[in-house]
Image: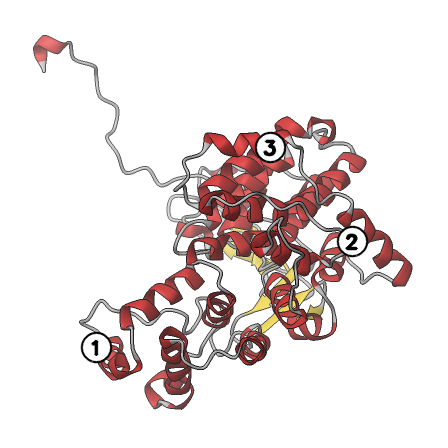
Amino acid sequence: MSDKKATLTVDGIDEPIELPVYSGTLGPDVIDVGALTAKGLFTYDPGFVSTAACESQITFIDGGKGILLHRGYPIDQLANQSDYLETCYLLLYGELPNKEEKEKFVSTITKHTMVHEQLARFFQGFRRDAHPMAIMCGVVGALSAFYHDSLDISDESHRQIAAFRLIAKMPTLAAMSYKFSIGQPFMYPDNSMGYAENFLHMMFGNPCEPSNVSPVLSKAMDRIFTLHADHEQNASTSTVRLAGSSGANPFACIAAGIAALWGPSHGGANEAVLEMLEEIGDVYHIDEFVARAKDKNDPFRLMGFGHRVYKNFDPRAKVMKESADEVLAELGIVDDPLLAVAKRLEEIALEDEYFIERKLYPNVDFYSGIILKAMGIPTSMFTVIFAVGRTVGWIAHWHEMISGSYRIGRPRQLYTGYTQRDFKPMDQR
């Protein structure tokens, strides 16, 4: 924080309005506009893209420089040297764990992977062809009905057990959503396996034979979870915070985050990548579609290139590219037409001056879409997997807010409707 001030002069108000200016440890200064309310003024910021709605110590992004830090640690270091559950610990507690702390944390999460048996019957209420994200919205919200012993948000121990349960059970629920959609029996978690390995076991295993999960695929899935663990105050995280500001229980708040993530402008980007690849269909059609992408009058857009936040490069993409190469090599995929299209598009984006000048580089969604497609995961599950990884970010932000001082969210508006009108009886209209 600093003692700097901003002065605002408004026509019709005699005195200039002084507004405090605060400085964080990183990033631009922010102007506290709270004093405007007493003067009968609000600020107008559609989408809150220029508004800091909270103070946080969890994640920092500098899109211009391609920086993503979790508690100060660069995302590429965490993805290459750490693992998902260690990153979860970092996001929740603010520091990397020592060996004993990590072992205890991993053990605790592992012991919570099972879900209440009645949840299996809860799934039967959904249509078989329901989208897995629709199912996830319902079953995660329903957790508050099954685990109502941890809903006192003023109790630190309740908040902690809710965090453990959410991180542990999300992969189980995600895999159940997939199994339900294809008519296969649910697979119980195997607590002898690691977090990502267990998820793949529940996704692709069956009760008739033992699971044999490739370490390369497990590592790639762990990286996907890690690279999506948190991304500052995005739409879904802000939704979780706003829902939480009302005092709602954590399961309801995370369900709200899942609903926001489901939007195609947010969590559906890697799904859109596969839909684009399917539209192109074959490497022989790439030149045609690239030409369309360059035509400003053509509505076609290449998905998975560039990023709204990162203006030069996505720091997560390099790590994800390495995983994509490892997965394709492990699976020996050489003749898949969609993956061939993806590889050729990647080459064009890194070589063509049109893409280079406009910084349309392959982003994390492009590579994660390739990986998930190669693993045999259907596109309808892509956003579900995103939700699994992002759960820790949501719960960390929720916990940070509830643990400090906060107010219920109450955005203002610029009203442009009718002025006051008198009601007319039906026979006078």
Q: Which residue is mark 2?
A: 93
Q: Is residue 246 visible?
A: no
**Label 2 amino acid?**
Tyr
Residue lying farthest right? 100
Q: Position of residue 414 (x, y in %)?
A: 35, 41
- In the picture shown, does residue 56 fall above or below 125? below
Give the colouring mode of the picture.
secondary structure
**Label 1 amino acid?**
Asp
Q: Which residue is mark 3?
A: 119
- Marked residue nearer the N-terminal end (1 or 3): 3
Q: Secondary structure at mark 3?
A: helix
Q: Which residue is mark 1?
A: 295
Q: Position of residue 159 (x, y in %)?
A: 74, 38
Q: CA distance from mark 1 to mark 2?
A: 48 Å
- Marked residue nearer the N-terminal end (1 or 2): 2
Left or right: where 114 falls relative to 361: right
**Label 1: few (<14), some (14–19) or many (≥20) C-alpha neighbours in 10 Å:** few
Proximity of marks 3 and 2: CB atoms separated by less than 8 Å: no
Q: Position of residue 93 (x, y in %)?
A: 78, 53
